[in-house]
Structures are given as structure tokens and as C-alpha cells.
Amino acid sequence: MANTSAIFIFVISALLVISAKAFEEVKFGYDGATKPALWASLHPAFKDCSHGSNQSPINIVKGDLTLNKDLPPLTRNYKQANASLINDGNRVMLRWAEDAGELLSDGKSNMLKELYWHLPSEHTINGERFPLEVQLYHESKDGNISMLSILYQYGGPDPFLSQMEEQLKELAEDNCSEDEEAVVPLEAVKTKQLRRNTLKYYTYLGSLTTPPCTENVTWNILGKVREFSKEQEIALKAPLEKGYLQNSRPLQSLNGREVQLYTAATTGDN
């Protein structure tokens, strides 16, 4: 019986590994046969992309917010750490190779793992879509996901992005095959600009904005819109294939969800 149980566990584990590998190899896109409306048909694990009730992104309507005075400030204890700049086929992203610090939310520590650039923004404010949205992905020890989003308009260069100018050029020159990630190492990525104080943010319960569109994700969108340059926009798009130059999922229905507002005692829009 013991041997039978061991064999059964081994088989299940092997099937899970095969399933996970198949999941990773599924190519999704933003137009044509792999567009967002068809994501759920690409793999059984993507079913929430069409059938989930708490999907992201959403339009944030300032007149429909719930002011929650009990919300805590967003404490970001990020730190300098090594990372990799990656073109994963549908977006440019950062993946930290070591401890890059944490986001404290609801008294829980959420470790910073990855950062994604989406052009144009996925979330909108009062129907306004911005040229860029930066999304920081965090995980707690119990597996909960928290996202922190920063919206950008055209203006001066973003200092955080400026530090990886040469590596972005290198990423754009990497001619890897379609099923491979292009990876460029980055040493000691500075995170000071990601830790700036926040006087206002919006929060709601949503999902990942790419397959498998996992739900029960806590979203925190900063109220202060920052700036980046058009030259930086060109640099972020350079590594991407033509069909991914605009890599934003369409807005999803709120389905009765509440969007809460945090404001500090000091008036402002940060």
C-alpha cells in the first residue's frame, strides 16, 4: 500500500509539473486570435478571464469612492537589490533576484517580486487613460497577492526608468526565439523613487490583468500621476513585437465592488 501511495503521489506531482509547463507555453495577446476576449479559450486555467466576477483593470470614478478613514498609509520598505530586465513576450518587466523589500498593507508584509510596464495604462480615472502604468507585484508568506499601481503622463524622464537606459537598449537588441524570454541582468536597482510618500490612493479587490487572471488580488493605485518622457516610451516599446506595443487589457465590469479611498490628513493628490 505504501508503494502504491508513493507512486500515486509521484504521478500527480508529475502531472502538475507538465500542466504548469503547458500553462507557461500558452501564448496570449492583445489582438487577433489571442485577444483578451478569447483568453479563457486558450487554456482551462484561464477560465477566470471570462467567468470571474472580480476582474481587473477597472475605471475608477472619483464620485463613487468610499472614503475609509481606517485605511493605513502604504508603507514601502523597498531596498536596493539585483534584478533582471525581461521581455517576456507581451511586456517589459523587472524580476528581482533577491530580497528587494516589502509593502506593508493591512498589517501584512508583502514582498516585492516583480514590476511590469503597461502601455497605455490599464486602469483609468474618470474614464481617462494614461500613456503608462507601472505595476509592482508583491506576495505575502501565505500566498496573497498585492499590486501597487503608478500612473504616468508625458513630461520629464522618470528617474527610476532612467537608471536602466543602456539595459533597455540591450534588451531591444536581443533576438531570442518567440518561446524564450530575453533577459538582461541589472545590478543594485535603486528603488528610492518607488518609495515616495503617498497622500492618496485607491484600493479594491480585483485580479491579475494577464492570464490566468487570478482573483482575490488587492490593488492599490496611487493618486499622484507621475511623469515619463516620450523617449522612454519608445525605449519600453523597442523590445516588443508589433502586436504587443499596446499591451493593456480592456476595462472590466465592477460588478458591485467597492473602491475605497485613502487620504492623508494633509490635503493633496499624491
Image: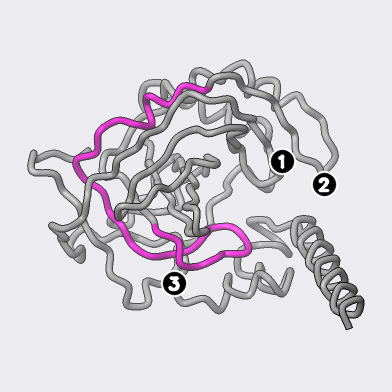
Mark 3 and mark 2: Cα distance apart in space: 30 Å
Is label 3 in a helix, a strand or a loop?
loop
Q: Are marks 1 and 3 in contact (CB under 8 Å)?
A: no
The amino acid at mark 2 is Asp
Disc 1 target residue: 241
Q: Does residue 117 show up? A: no
Image height of 259 relative to 169, above or below: below
Is label 2 in a helix, a strand or a loop?
loop
Q: Does residue 200 show up? A: yes
Q: Quadrant of the N terminus?
A: bottom right
The magenta-colored residue range is 189-218
Using a 10 Å C-alpha cutoff, classify the residue at mark 2 as few (fewer than 14 neighbours), some (14 to 19) or many (20 or more): few
Residue 79 position in % (x across, y down): 44, 27
The amino acid at mark 3 is Asn
- Inspect the magenta stretch and tell me whether residue 128 lies in it: no
Q: Earlier in the sequence, mark 1 or mark 2?
A: 2
The amino acid at mark 1 is Glu
Mark 1 and mark 3: Cα distance apart in space: 30 Å
Judged left or right of residue 253, residue 37 is right
Disc 3 target residue: 54
Judged left or right of residue 244, residue 66 is left
Disc 2 target residue: 179
Q: Quadrant of the C terminus?
A: top left
In the image, what residue occupies the spot 49% across and 25% down? Answer: 161
Foreground residue among 196 and 91: 196
Residue 180 position in % (x across, y down): 81, 42
Foreground residue among 256 and 36: 256
Quadrant of res 194: top left
Q: Earlier in the sequence, mark 1 or mark 3?
A: 3
Mark 1 and mark 2: Cα distance apart in space: 13 Å
Quadrant of res 6: bottom right
In the image, what residue occupies the spot 48% across and 56% down? Answer: 145
